Amino acid sequence: MESLSDTKWDVVISGTGLQQSLLALALSRSEKNILHVDHNDFYGESEAALSLHEADVWAQRHAAHGEGIFSAAEVTKDDAGLSFSRAYSLALAPQLIHARSDLLSQLVSSKAFRQVEFLAVGSFFIYQDEALSRIPSTREDVFVNTTISARSKRALMKFLKFVLEYDSEPQVMVWKAKASEPLVDFLLSDFKLDRDLRSYVVALTLSLDERIPVEAGLAAIKRHLTSMGVFGPGFAAVYPKWGGISEIAQVGCRAGAVGGAVYMLGTGVSGVETAEDELEIKLTNDLAVRTKTLVQGASKPMKQSPSVSRLTAVVASDFSSLFETTIEGSPTPCVAVVAFPSESVVDSNGTSNSPIYALVHSSDTGECPAGQCTIYLSTVSTPRSKDMLDAALSCLLATSPEPVGCLYKLRYDQKGGTGSFTVDGGCGTFGLPPLDLAFNDSALASVREAWDMVVPNGEGDYMQFNDREGAFDEDAVGD
């Protein structure tokens, strides 16, 4: 068997983030020589899911207030109420996946879906006047809602009908001239929705920008509405068990390993030199390898990269009221979404200036033990965002009829990008992934571009595989 240095690799993939891992999946039947490395000792990179011990170590590594992808990380905890470290799997960038997402279609066509257990995302709630209200997100919800007046129901029904056809020729003329204007203003001027209904509609976009433009907002709401019921009654999105997007990344790497790729965790790329028609890659373990192509993730953010502040909290309550089914025959949801509109959260220094979202995960996600739940809060980074996230968490816990203790907190800032793909000679680089709370399909186009770079003549069908016996050996790639 040739050593790593003696092998001429077709591609070296650096990083096991979702895009690199999907590339590994796409190449898993290509018979290419693939070396896949990651400087971390865990899979998933920016989308990783960490045990408590891993999260503690990770927070120490990213504690500095700097210009890195992650910064200002810190942990506070109550050891007395926590279980053992690996009873937890905390996602660094939790994202819902809408049923109409192309990501799910590609996981099905590549047969990788068989290795992922998807769970239902349930109701959306909004925090107003110190209480939670369920957001009506379908026409059926509107009909049975007893708190919305008949007049407001008619206005909301008119909008829901419009948004389902917003991109058809007659409807485009209604909004095209206002495409870049705030959606919230459009809802008032064109549909006469009152303040509460505007808050409901904007919350369904899952946007941290309360001034989300009309075009982007309509697309997000249509995605939600058309995803409802695709995989069963009562839910529009799913969440992969055991850590969300990180689980999909591991499945992609596992497929790569079964296809013959060589994996090295704890080893990154320290240097790249061009030599004739190939690249010489220096690894952090002082090994040098030769390859035709290098595909990597961005190592640092751009100057104007968007930034979010996150707070992950493990609490001593199962918050069972948030995970109730609303339609007969629907599965029990494992995720609930709570939206805090701007100015709905108050602390000693004033009100929140940006929306805050909380993704509440039950123990069914595998991310915490029974009797607890994991709450992921996100908002736009500002000097006050840390305090606002704490205040939002306190508001959410206060809605419980019984006192709820917080067992663990992990807070940090994260910078993102568009996930675009750029090529410089034999090197291809994925930009930082988007910071959206729902998976953005635009990231998939970049994976296809990377595949085209490695397979320039289009050998084989992209992400179109037949089943093969024993393709996914659980021991092929470690956890």
Image (cartoon, rainbow, N blue to C red):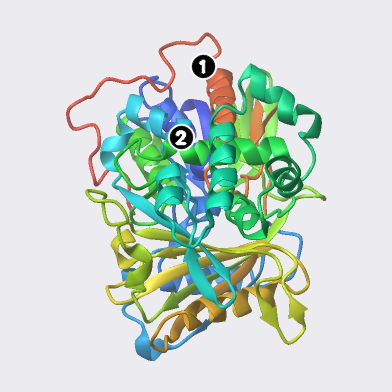
Across the whole image, how many numbered discs are drawn on residues?
2
Question: To which residue does mark 1 refer?
Answer: 455
Tell me where residue 245 appears, x and y as whole percent: 45, 48
Tell me where residue 129 appears, x and y as whole percent: 59, 75
Q: Looking at the rendering, which quadrant does residue 433 occupy?
A: top right
Foreground tag (1 vs 2):
2
Q: Is residue 310 left or right of residue 422?
A: left
Residue at 42 percent of width and 48 percent of height: 143
Q: Is residue 157 left or right of residue 107?
A: right
User: Which quarter shows the N terminus?
Assistant: top left
Q: Looking at the rendering, which quadrant does residue 294 occupy?
A: top right
Extreme-left residue of the structure: 469
Q: In the rendered structure, which amino acid carries the disc numbered 2?
A: Thr
Q: In the rendered structure, which amino acid carries the disc numbered 1?
A: Val
Question: To which residue does mark 2 refer?
Answer: 226
Work out whether residue 374 can be spotted.
yes
Foreground residue, 79 or 342? 342
Residue at 24 percent of width and 45 percent of height: 474
Cα distance between the residues tagged 1 and 2: 34 Å
Residue at 66 percent of width and 50 percent of height: 193
Q: Is residue 114 left or right of residue 280?
A: left
Extreme-front residue of the structure: 150
- Tag 1 secondary structure: loop
Q: Is residue 436 above or below residue 133?
A: above
Tell me where residue 407 appears, x and y as whole percent: 43, 83
Bin the neighbour count of mark 1 within 10 Å (Cα to Cα): few under 14, some 14-19, many 20 and up: some
- Tag 2 secondary structure: helix
Residue at 34 percent of width and 50 percent of height: 120
Q: Which mark is residue 173?
A: none
Foreground residue, 341 or 249? 341
